[in-house]
Image (spheres, rainbow, N blue to C red):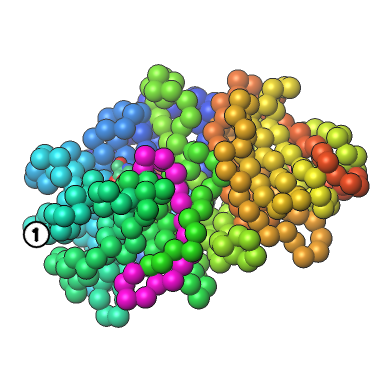
Amino acid sequence: MQTPPTKDSSHPRSDHHRPRYHFLPPENWMNDPNGLIQWQGVYHLFYQYNPNGPLWGTIHWGHATSADLVNWRYHPLALTPGPEGYDVDGCWSGCAVDDEDRLALLYTGKGDDGRENLCIAHAGPSLDAFQKHPANPLDARPPHAIEAPGIRDPFIWREAGQWRLLLGSGVRGEGGAALLYTSTDLLHWKYQHPLAVGDGSTGEMWECPNFIPLGDRNVLIISALPQVTVLASVGDYADGRFTPDEWRRMDGGDAWYAPQIFFDSQRRPLVIGWIKEERDDQAQQAAGWSGVMSLPRILSAGVGAAPFSVAPVPEVTQLRANERTHVFHLANEERVTIPTNSHGQWEVELLVDQTDGAFTLTLVEHDATLAEVIVDLTSSRAGLAGPTQSATAWMPYTPPASGPLRIVCFFDHSVVECFVQGQASLTKRVYPQALEAVHVRVAASGASAPSRLHARVWDMRDATLSEAPQR
Ligand code: DQQ
């Protein structure tokens, strides 16, 4: 069993753009979260990982655990490609389930023939060693006529005494698809039909499908290719088929991808996504690491215009320190700067008493814009712009029935995660040269009355990311 790389390479840690309270491995490349599960009280996060360098390739499953979703321990690598041909080119994304009291990982084996194979591995007693099943690769071919561009990223749940499996795929000439299979033993799978097929506007290939009940409806989440965008729709589920109401972006930025969702023991639907780098390969090579997980978020059924809501888990507040409060009365077209701190780790909460026009929260380095959250109060939508691009997506939110609008932004060296009214998320990467020069500037425009602004700023402590004790 390979162990995760030791931390003798100090240079990933010396990169001032490396986050300190978001999860990431000690070094090298990480992409999708996999196998999210709370097992005997402990949260497990597996992840797509290249132990050989900071760019995508030779994909293994890394493994970490947490008692609180904030502080994590690294464990030995859970899945390593090969030596069998069915996963020799990579152990791609998948999920974790309770297989009669054994932790089982269902994953995508990338075969030496280029095929994507459904595979299963079981944990030994320590949960630090996983045994690939001799029945691999499992037979989960869809009918040939579908001409699927891929079959990957198993997502599994129990229903009516059976296992149900979704594979991310597509139907040639139609669009992305989530294919539905059933099984009684996790080894033998029977193809049923697509749970849902897109009409082409949602991509040709759906990666990483996630499907859960949400309130009294269901929600399907997909990572659409070639757009590389996460879409979700609430809809009706009957007879193994899902009818979406309307596909919407799940995050208003372009950096958040391939999320996975799971229910914890409190029955909270928790979602973690991969926050990609938005700097080039050369910069990632030089840094020695790439990719970070979003803060865990809670998904809930929306109200009004927003069909679902996304908010950070409350556990994150344990990292807050040194609360500062600022109160401003902001005249129309006026802007003020809210000081943050010099070390690039902070959270700001804004309570905004403004009912029309627009409110903008701009992350600036000295005077230069790094990112801009624009809240259109008149239409109740929020967007995320960059220094050279305007907002690409507008996320609807339901305004408070009374009282101020609440905007929360987290900054962690190069990660920006903002949440509007605990409903709409906006995620972006920025790479400032001088962390001490990064501040928040707020402005009101088109407002019919001055707005009152109540701001709280906290320093955020480092999360603890440590090696698991040797057994
Ligand atoms: N990443 C994995 C695939 C998945 C894609 C490979 C999404 O299984 O479809 O690393 O980022």
Residue 247 located within the stretch drawn in magenta: no
Q: Position of residue 216 (x, y in %)?
A: 50, 76
Q: Is residue 386 left or right of residue 66?
A: right
Q: Is mark 1 within 8 Å of ligand 1?
A: no
Label 1 residue SS: loop
Residue at 32% from the left image edge and 39% from the top image edge? 49
| Label 1 sits on residue | 135
For the residue carrying disc 1, how many other residues have a C-alpha within 10 Å: few (<14), some (14-19), or many (20+)? Answer: few
Tell me where the magenta segment starts and ends, as one range: 224-241
Tell me if residue 126 can be seen.
Answer: no
Magenta: main secondary structure equals strand
Q: Name the one closer to the observer, 49 or 229.
A: 229
Q: Name the one closer to the observer, 305 or 53.
A: 305
In the picture shown, does residue 208 fall above or below 360? Answer: below
Residue 240 located within the stretch drawn in magenta: yes
Residue that sits furthest to the bottom in the current view: 160
Residue at 82% from the left image edge and 53% from the top image edge? 355
Residue at 61% from the left image edge and 50% from the top image edge? 395
Q: Position of residue 303 (x, y in %)?
A: 63, 66
Q: Is residue 415 left or right of residue 199?
A: right
In the picture shown, does residue 186 fall above or below 328? Answer: below
Q: Is residue 172 left or right of residue 406?
A: left
Q: Name the one closer to the observer, 320 or 53.
A: 53
Name which residue type carries label 1: Ala
Q: Quadrant of ligand 1?
A: top left
Q: Position of residue 291 (x, y in %)?
A: 43, 36
Q: Is residue 428 left or right of residue 48?
A: right
In which image quadrant can residue 192 be found?
Answer: bottom left
